[in-house]
Image: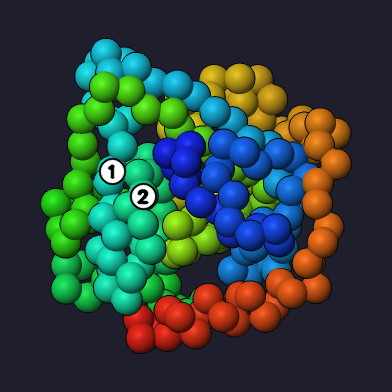
């Protein structure tokens, strides 16, 4: 899954908004499909004891500029199965790349390299942002996959992310169909201002990423 710490800044049509403040209907910038409406936002508090008892859920800290070129812009904490678009999951060759030329690599496979560490915490609030389908969104200024539990297009490749989502947000196991997830959109009216700027903002982000493109 892609769970962030709740304070992670997500790029929207209204600017950067902390993940925990997003609501169904808000328009989030995606790498491949301009702005897309949020369909569901989940928040889960995890106490230190819970994380000790479930070490596979301990967050992975990605330090600012761990990927060079100020990427990410700020430190960001991700769930272990959060995936990034990388050219090669190999130390020394992992660089963010243009669409269509990447592998989606779980951050847990990059632990202990170049400012990426799994850490112990006394507590953490995870946020998960879900859309109608899998998307790649800007979190603290770099691209991260947003996994949709109700989209089975990835087949078995999505099992690790889906199982992690259901462990952190068990309520989704009971409402995993896309129709049930979409029903959450009725709780928010969303924002529409600035949607026409989607393509230009994606281009701007790609230009900033250009030194890392393959």
Q: Earlier in the sequence, mark 2 or mark 1?
A: 1
Instruction: Relative to 58, say whether 116 is above or below.
Output: below
Numbered circle sitting on residue 60: 1
The residue located at (65%, 41%) in the rendering is: 22
Image spot of residue 45 (x, y percent): 45, 21
Image spot of residue 77 (x, y percent): 35, 44
Instruction: Relative to 162, say whether 9 is above or below.
Output: below
Which quarter shows the C terminus?
bottom left
Instruction: Relative to 1, say whether 72 is above or below.
Output: below
The residue located at (36%, 57%) in the rendering is: 74
In depth, the one of 46 and 14 nearer the eye is: 14
Q: Is residue 104 visible?
A: no
Numbered circle sitting on residue 69: none
The colour mode here is rainbow
Secondary structure beneath dot 2 equals strand
Q: Which residue is mark 2?
A: 76
**Is residue 14 toward the left or the right of residue 61 in the image?**
right
Image spot of residue 56 (x, y percent): 28, 30
Observer-side mark, 2 or 1, equals: 2
Image spot of residue 87 (x, y percent): 34, 74
**Is residue 100 toward the left or the right of residue 49 in the image?**
right
């Amino acid at each position: 899954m892609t769970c962030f710490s709740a304070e992670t800044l997500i790029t929207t049509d209204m600017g950067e908004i902390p993940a925990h403040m997003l609501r169904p209907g808000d328009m989030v910038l995606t790498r491949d499909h301009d702005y897309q409406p949020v369909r569901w936002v989940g928040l889960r508090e995890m106490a230190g004891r819970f994380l000790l008892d479930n070490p596979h859920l301990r967050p992975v800290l990605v330090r600012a500029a761990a990927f060079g070129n100020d990427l990410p812009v700020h430190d960001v904490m991700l769930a272990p199965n959060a995936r990034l678009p990388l050219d090669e999951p190999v130390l020394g060759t992992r660089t963010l790349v243009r669409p269509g030329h990447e592998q989606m690599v779980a951050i847990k496979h990059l632990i202990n390299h170049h400012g990426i560490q799994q850490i112990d915490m006394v507590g953490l609030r995870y946020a998960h942002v879900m859309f109608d389908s899998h998307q790649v969104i800007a979190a603290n200024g770099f691209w991260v996959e947003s996994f949709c539990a109700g989209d089975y297009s990835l087949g078995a490749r999505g099992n690790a992310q889906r199982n992690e989502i259901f462990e952190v947000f068990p309520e989704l196991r009971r409402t995993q169909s896309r129709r049930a997830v979409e029903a959450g959109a009725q709780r928010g009216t969303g924002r529409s201002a600035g949607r026409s700027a989607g393509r230009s903002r994606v281009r701007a982000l790609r230009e900033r990423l250009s030194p890392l493109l393959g």
